[in-house]
Amino acid sequence: MNEKKENVIVNGFFWRFAERCGVQLISAVVSILLARILTPDDYGKVALVTVFNNIMYVLLDCGIGTALVQKKEVDELDYSSAFFFSIVISFVLYGGMFVAAPYLAAFYNDPSMTPIFRGISLTVAVCGIKTIQQAHVTRNMKFQYFFYSAFAGAIVSTILGLGLAYMGFGVWALVVQQVSNITVDTLVLWKLSSWRPKMEFWQHLKGLLSYGWKLLASSLSSVIYNNLRSLIIGKMYTSADLAYYNQGDNLTYNIASSVDTSIESVLFPVMSSLQDDRAQVKNMTRRSIKTCTYIIAPVMMSTAFCAEPLVRLILTEKWLPCVLFLRVFCLGYACWPIITANLNAAKAVGRSDLYLKCQLLNEGVCILLLLATFRVSVEAIAYGMLITNVVTQILDAQLNKKLIGYGYLEQMRDILPTLLLAAGAGLCMYLVIFLHLPDLLAVIIQVVVGLGIYLTGSAILELDTFEYFKDVLAPSIRQKLKR
């Protein structure tokens, strides 16, 4: 990879990682404070509504945003056509949810959820305005815009959410937090970006949809499947059960996605520009998997081994039932980079058809696991999700073995030393629990012990990714911070 391309990637990664980590840190602090004020039942209600919102987000994008980034040549007609199409779809979706809200609330035997459905779904209408602007910023690698807009949204929503929670507005603190976050984020992004739609559209929409519909079908099946668990738990069990399940998932997902999204969103447009050079795509996919795993694996392993004192310290005793779910999801997300990097490579080389086939195969297998576990218990559903991640890794890697010659066994050989070192560091952190120290002191010691063992082990074993961070990324980031 030439030096110019390397600088583009490092620069993009710096801003994307700063944005993701900064926003997730704010979100984590706010979530902790809100969780200490509000009840699990409040969180359970919002989690149910979020399921339907996630489905609408996928329908809204239609794969067009990804198509705009992947396409070799894009002009103003492409962007304008996609923008006005997105606006129409967003308002149709919100109108449908507004009408359907009372019926969905009745399905869950809780009429009070009707205004909650209608309130949170406003985020979908706002996303219709943001989606194409976001694709334009991504394609042009202006990731600093995401940093500023996301921070503005996080800060404003934090003030509003916490203020309403302290004033006793309950679940509505969560609703206002979500709506204000996406609204401010969108406004700032539009203010920073120079692109504006032109009143010329529809002409190029067909070409974008021909690529995007396959991603839409894949994403839609994926989001329905991933959220099906929440729908089933919310219907068959209690709102509190759903809140514990989702809290365990969200705490781990936010950490994993911060790193993964930072790297993948930067590499995708670069890989798309090099899509005809399969050797380059393979090298970048390998670097993505190794780099993401090196960061995510120790965090996931450490969180799994230290889950109980961590939850008791930051969320209080009332959230202890989420500890088991937190541990299960930590193990699942430790190898998540394999899944996302493989699918990203397939999208980058323009094979959205294979991407769709692979996703449908994954979900077919995983639906069988859900059917086998959903009547047993919520815990059984979580364990089924863990098995699902393993199956998905293998199937997605086989897809890339055909496309770029990078199969599952080769990928596992690349990251196995990192996984074993992370597991060893996590186990040493777990032993601190037997000292019976206060939670705060125990967590501090665990972090110091785990970080020390992981970094020392990386240096002794001379892990490739450790050397990459030390010799390539660290100097570039230090130089950028000085500027």
Image: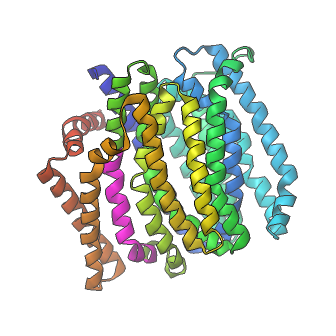
> Which quarter of the rendering shows the C terminus?
top left
Q: Residue furthest bottom?
A: 436
Apparent side of residue 10 relative to residue 207 in the rendered image (left or right): left
Q: Is residue 275 above or below residue 38?
A: above
Give the image quarter of residue 310.
bottom left
Q: Residue furthest left?
A: 460
**For the point 53% across and 43% down, which residue is it?**
150
In the image, residue 224 lies at what x, y percent? 67, 51
Which of 363 and 250 lies nearest the eye of the viewer? 363
In the image, residue 396 lies at what x, y percent? 47, 42
Q: Does the rendering let one see residue 34?
A: no
Give the image quarter of residue 470.
top left
The number of callouts visible is: 0
Q: Is residue 446 magenta?
A: no
**For the point 76% across and 54% down, which residue is it?**
119
* Magenta region: 292-312
In the image, residue 172 lies at what x, y percent? 71, 63
